[in-house]
Amino acid sequence: MKNILDRNQNKAGEVRNLLVAKKVLMVNLISSPGAGKTTLLERTCEELNKKFRIGIIEGDITTDRDAQRLKKYNIPIVVINTEGGCHLDSHSISKVLDSFDLDDLDVLFVENVGNLICPSQFDLGETFKLAIVSTTEGDDKPGKYPMLFREAKAVLLNKIDLIPYTNFKRETFNSDLKNINGQVPLFEISCTRGNGLKEWIKWISKQILSTSSTEV
Amino acid sequence: MKNILDRNQNKAGEVRNLLVAKKVLMVNLISSPGAGKTTLLERTCEELNKKFRIGIIEGDITTDRDAQRLKKYNIPIVVINTEGGCHLDSHSISKVLDSFDLDDLDVLFVENVGNLICPSQFDLGETFKLAIVSTTEGDDKPGKYPMLFREAKAVLLNKIDLIPYTNFKRETFNSDLKNINGQVPLFEISCTRGNGLKEWIKWISKQILSTSSTEV
């Protein structure tokens, strides 16, 4: 296991150096299955497609369904099928980077395989990791799966429109998250209803601008 | 990886032989984080605690929160903390079996780590795997994460009370599931509202009776 992680880390360093040189922000999106990664990308593409040059890497076990949903934005998308593998690694990312014209990109979103555990242990060479968690998974996720929440540069709490129909308690969620990563920005959103997306778009735009050569 | 799986399989065989000899049904509960495994165990213990002798193994990364929720049923519970590991394996199960009096058990529920991928690849020596998936994860889970659904002896679709507030389509879910595992029994349930639990309890009771020496 240590060898695998060491080899992954070395290649991640190469990927990171390349992206810094090309001024491309790479965001590693991590969540449980069905927390809303693809829907977040849909909403984000709708808002940012005119301002920034976006690329997407879709990590999926066996299908290209998520990529199909994103085709309508006419942006470069590459699918990595892990064929049963539970996370992306830096070697698979490095290989597909050749498919993009990095000089023509500001931001590259990587949608990792739906899994709250393994993807947080593999550096892809990303600029940062982003945690998405949905209210319907329960308020105990940061406490029970701390690794991702410790590493994430920001946390998106999705499906807040469903809180009234569940036993999700904001105090439990917020208190656990604060214990694990006290300073992390938290965005409460609903990707289907639109709540909170303005704040998210503003934040991610700032991150892209601080990296890319595009001026808005 | 092959070595790890081979070693796991050998130990799983030992576990299975022991459980068969002791007439204990072992159910390996697998789902995404927050799909409702612990709540299903709560409802199941409430119904079956007087009829059968139940034991529980709680697989969790770092806390004993799920075990705490189940303490009120006064049944033997053992926690396995994987310390970052993304699934249980047969070696950890084998070790904790000593903590149970197997002659005094009819059924042993194993709540695996919340992960729709890795746990389906590790035989624990269970009698069968059970897949739980919630409607709020989306209707595309069997299609996108087929391994578990192919292996499961039954599928529980939880949180059906939330369908009206989501874009979950039964036809998509059912059609994908049928393609992957045509004959698998499907139980539509809501562990918080009680829907469908009678049918589930009837089915699992039948499974326990067919293995155990208890007569009801």
Image (cartoon, coloured by chain):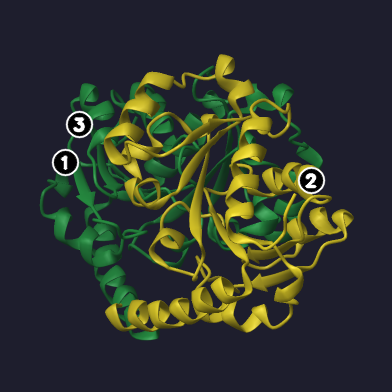
Chain colours: A green, B yellow
Few, some or many residues within 10 Å of mark 2 (<14, 14–19, 20+): some
For residue B70, what is the image quadrant? bottom right
Between marks 2 and 3, how big is the CA–CA gap?
A: 39 Å
Q: Nearer the viewer, residue B46 or A114?
A: B46
Disc 2 or 1, which lies upstream in sequence? 1
Few, some or many residues within 10 Å of mark 3 (<14, 14–19, 20+): some
Residue B25's x, y, as percent?
Answer: 60, 62
Residue at left offset 12%, top offset 46%: A101
Residue A83's x, y, as percent?
Answer: 24, 56
Q: Chain of mark 3?
A: A
Residue B134 in sight in this render: yes
Residue at left offset 17%, top offset 54%: A97
Q: Are marks 2 and 1 on the same chain?
A: yes
Residue A58's x, y, as percent?
Answer: 27, 44
Residue at left offset 37%, top offset 32%: B140
Q: Which residue is mark 3?
A: A75
Q: Nearer the viewer, residue B166 or A178?
A: B166
Residue A3 in the image: above or below residue A23: below
- Give the farthest residue toward the top: B164
Looking at the rendered image, the disc whose residue lies closer to the viewer, 2 or 1, is: 2
- Three-letter code for the amino acid on which mark 2 is drawn: Thr
Residue A142 in the image: above or below residue A187: below
Quarter holding the C terminus of chain A is: top left
Q: What is the number of the mark on residue A172? A: 2
Residue at left offset 27%, top offset 51%: A23
Query: Left or right: A110 with respect to A153?
Result: left
Between marks 1 and 3, how big is the CA–CA gap?
A: 11 Å
Disc 2 or 3, which lies upstream in sequence? 3
- Three-letter code for the amino acid on which mark 3 is drawn: Ile
Q: Which residue is mark 1?
A: A104
